[in-house]
Amino acid sequence: MPSRESIDRFTALPDPGEARTVDDLVERLRRLKVWAGNPSYEQIAGRVAAGWTAAGRPAAEVPGKTTVVDCFRAGRRRLNADLVAAVVSALHPDAGYAAQWQQALRMIAGEISPAGQVRVQDRLPPDLAGFTGRTTELGRLRRAFGQDRSDTGVVVISALAGMAGVGKTQLAVRLGHHLLREKRFDRVLFVNLRGFHPDPAQPPADPAAVLDGFLRLLGVPGQQIPYGMTARAALYRDRLAGARALVVLDNAADAEQVRPLLPDTAGSPGCLVLVTSRRDLGDLLRPATHVTVNVFTSAEARQYLTRAAPGVPVGDDPDAVARIAARCGHLPLALGLVAGHIRAKPGWTLTDHADRLDEHHQHRRMETGVQVALDLSYRQLLAAEQRLLRLVALHPGQDLDAYAAAALADTDLDTARTVLDRSHRDHLLQQVSPDRYNQHDLIRAHAMNHTVDDDPPHERRAALTRLFDYFLATAAAAMDTLYPAEKHRRPRIPAPKTPTPTLTDPGIARAWLDLERPTLVAVAAYTATHGWPTHTTRLSTTLLRSLSGGDHADTLAVHGHALHAARQSGDSDGQAEARTNLGFIHAQLGHYQDAADHLTQALHLFGRAGNLDGQARALGNLGGVDERLGHYQDAAEHYRRALALYRQAGDRHGEARAVNSLGLVQARLGRYEPATAHHEQALTLYRQANNQHGEANALINLGDAEMRMGRYGAAADHLGQALTLYRQLGNRTNEAHALDSIGILHTRLGEPDQATVHYERALAIFREIGARYGEACALNGLGETAGPSDAIAHHTAAVIIATDVGDRVQQARAHTGLGHAHRTLGNADQAHHHWQQALALYTDLGTHHADEIRTHLAALPGTDPAGR
């Protein structure tokens, strides 16, 4: 007889949030299928097809039975988010439950998987000063580009294939720089797809993650980027339509990875795609110019060595250069390494170097020129330099500077800089920008092999611990400079034993955080899954304020990694902190159910631990969710409970926050006098504590309340001060909210042109950062200043977004505006319909706006003055 536990396992609705891996999620999908009555795969596929067809998706995208079955198959590396969500909806038609699966997919497949971490760039890497040869390949590529542009107008896909170290990337970069100098393109998209990275922790980049990055570079706000690969690729191709863009897809694993990243052939005649790979990509789905990049010819190899090591005497053997080239297999990477070795040996002739290569080859029995060159280059380094090169290969990010190198090697900054510079000159490192370096895959593999052989595991772990200590401490120093009043909320991080940059200037601190942001996300991912969970959770809490005002995808990733790490290590305090942070961000994104779920669980964990401050923060954020949803009494109760806990804990910053929030609820209910009093009290508390962020929040709320009371002069002053502070603090989200409030002020002052300027600026920022609630606010503002036709467009867009995120205030505001627009156009029935919608919402919210709507309805012919 089956146990009660096994019965419950299949009769209870599976929780996707408990999944840790793709296989975990697949197993829960199977349980959901059983829970739903175990329909056949054909039935599930039929339901999905019906839903997608009804939604207007093209027939080519509708999945068949085999594709649906694949969703239930274990051993998958990633899942199609669109399809899984559709399957879940076919098994349990609840939108909120499907959203939980989408969140789980983001956490597992996109935000925790290293394949989802990729750095895209809007510029090419530096051109190689000593570039040699490749005249034939460059000529062929340029002819193909010119012919395709003039004859057929199609995208040129130049698939540059060849062995590792042959110079494919440099050839593509050289061609790209030539074309940019000729002004053939207006923009560049570049990515290293990591097709053959030697570190298993750095798998080939997920093309969905690459599309996310490219779309952001193309100006698409994060919240508007679709989840599914197909939808992302379609939006990407739409954005490139008519553009003149150079797209470089470097180090591709295979055609499957490349295909979603190709522009549309017919719609993007001004685009050029350059793909490099070690594999022949002959199975790309469109005509392409395939160029196989071979090793240098004998003449090119001799020319390269002569240029790279000028002035070195030949010695007794006039064929010494040819012998060196032959021993290197004419491979550009190997030749560059040997050239560095030649420059480092003054007094040696080229004959000496050729003889040494012969001896080394015979002794080591190496089979390839690059192995000979790597070994020679490595062995010529001092012991400390060898160690640094080995440890650099452990770095989880895509590039590093001297500070990170010094942390890995436990050395001083000058030594680290000297070794990095020398390694770059000797082709052991590539310079991606001033003072930042990365390693070629082959060199990294060579270095990783040596570190496994030469560095005991405890020393490698110590090196990585120093690196993670450095990033955590430096991030904390930057945050203390930018947000000094909130130091008490962040974990105290001891100063590392290795050098750190001076970040006492706010501009420099913010620049460091922006530059290292991809690395910090990579560090969070690595530490969460490789045995440094405390580093992950502390990094998440340390970066909360910095992350919350910018790219929400990175924010969700870091806090998601923290939650994963805390769960794996059984750290209930870390789970509570991570859930509080995730709840705060989801609320900003308008994901109110996700926010409430995280915050409710955080409140329980904090309560179990007796953490008063944590409970108060969770309650305050829950109040914010209730406020956005229009549950004002519930919001006020949460804020009052938070205020009591903050006072009990003696936290003046938290007290100010709770008082400020209570003022917001009073304002929502139309009680502007008590709202103003609360905001003034909060402003005093924040200023006493020198909390600029809190001060700005109190100022904007005070200005809003004063504006509603007709105190326009005071409102303008306070809103202007808030805008200035938010800009100084680099908080894009609240900068946009301040612009939106100033737009409302100008609307009330009868200055529609100035209002429109502020609303449009706010809307641009909201869309850029993916803040959908703010987007609805700005759209409603634009509707209130526009003519009736444009107003209908703006308010319609606003009501769609507000309904999607569950914000009833902006829904009601949009319906109010639609009623006004239709009345102006003489559409009395439409005006009546929208005002009735607004009345129902405002009545349920319990705000004074309901009386205003009743007045508008009473003025319509044949309408009950009570609004019935």
Image (spheres, helix red, strand yellow):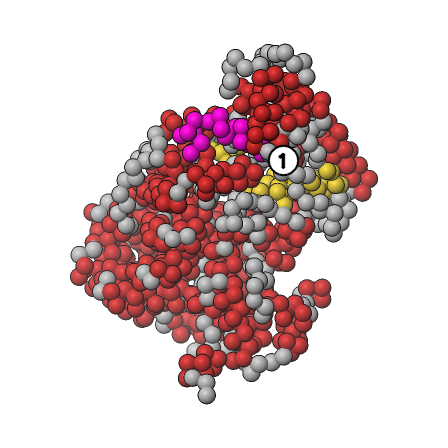
Residue placed at 72% from the left, 27% from the top?
A: 297
Position in image of residue 696 (x %, y %) = 32, 48
Q: Find residue 482 and report its image quarter.
A: top left
Tell me the residue that label 1 is attached to. 367
Residue 380 in sight here: yes
**Lateral position of residue 498 relative to residue 182, left or right:** left
Q: Residue at x 39, y 45 (%)?
A: 457
Can you say whether 380 is above or below 117 in the image? Answer: above
In the displayed structure, would residue 371 be above or below residue 113?
Answer: above
Q: Nearer the viewer, residue 787 or 761?
A: 761
Residue drawn at point x = 63 percent, y = 23 percent: 324
Q: Nearer the viewer, residue 104 or 415?
A: 415
**Residue 93 on image: x %, y %:** 54, 76
237 or 449: nearer the viewer: 449
How dense is the environment of label 1, judged by Cα within 10 Å: few (below 14), some, or many (20 and up)? few
Q: Is residue 163 magenta?
A: no
Which residue is painted at 63% across and 79% down in the image?
Answer: 40
552 left or right of 150?
A: left
Q: Amino acid at mark 1?
A: Glu
Q: Which residues are magenta?
A: 371-388
Q: Secondary structure at mark 1?
A: loop
Q: Is residue 62 left or right of residue 814?
A: right
